[in-house]
């Protein structure tokens, strides 16, 4: 598997074990990880334009007024075509193409994030290669 460029990833989860486990695993792969235990804190991290978030994992249900779906909408204002990974009550793909995992384990979320990063790298490479061949 090819190496993925380090990214800034936001983990929004009110479960401290899940949040910190994911943060440790992703940090060990040289990613910069921002964590939030409420939707409001995650929302503020997404709005910090001086430190843009590259990828988002969130629970669909979070404490407070801001839930994971609001975070996903905010994220898509900047990254329209990137997938958000959400933990929810049922496994599905949302109407925007976001991946909803049914009550996932840390391993399942980690694997989903890794797959999204690799898929994005491949899509970017394919797009760049196609543009280069048209220019030639």
Image: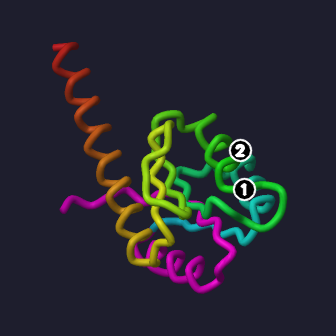
Asked if residue 70 shows in the view, the reply is yes
**Residue under numbered circle 1:** 67
Identified at 60% across, 51% down, the residue is: 53
Residue 49 is marked as 2
What is the C-alpha distance between the residues marked 2 and 1?
20 Å
Give the answer, above or below, for where 75 lies relative to 104: above
The extreme front residue here reads 90
Image quadrant occupied by the N terminus: bottom left
Give residue 120's position: percent from left, percent from top. 35, 45
The extreme bottom residue here reads 17
Q: Secondary structure at mark 1?
A: loop
The extreme top residue here reads 135
Q: Secondary structure at mark 2?
A: loop
Identified at 37% across, 56% down, the residue is: 5
Give the answer, above or below, for where 19 lies relative to 10: below
Give residue 9's position: percent from left, percent from top. 54, 60
Q: Which residues are magenta?
A: 1-30
Identified at 66% across, 52% down, the residue is: 51
Chain-order first, disc 2 or disc 1: 2
Q: Is-magenta flag for residue 4?
A: yes
Question: For mark 2, does the 10 Å Cα neighbourhood hold few (<14), some (14 to 19), or many (20 or more) residues?
Answer: few
Q: Is-magenta flag for residue 132?
A: no
């Amino acid at each position: 598997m090819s190496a993925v460029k380090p990214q800034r990833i936001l983990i929004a989860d009110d479960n401290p074990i899940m949040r910190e486990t994911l943060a440790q695993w992703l940090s060990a792969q040289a990613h910069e990880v921002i964590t939030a235990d409420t939707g409001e804190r995650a929302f503020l991290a997404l709005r910090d334009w001086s430190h843009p978030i590259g990828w988002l994992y969130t629970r669909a249900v979070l404490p407070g007024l801001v839930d994971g779906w609001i975070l996903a909408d905010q994220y898509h204002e900047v990254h329209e075509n990137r997938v958000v990974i959400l933990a929810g009550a049922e496994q599905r793909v949302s109407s925007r193409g976001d991946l909803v995992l049914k009550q996932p384990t840390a391993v399942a979320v980690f694997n989903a994030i890794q797959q999204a990063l690799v898929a994005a790298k491949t899509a970017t490479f394919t797009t760049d290669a196609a543009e280069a061949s048209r220019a030639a």
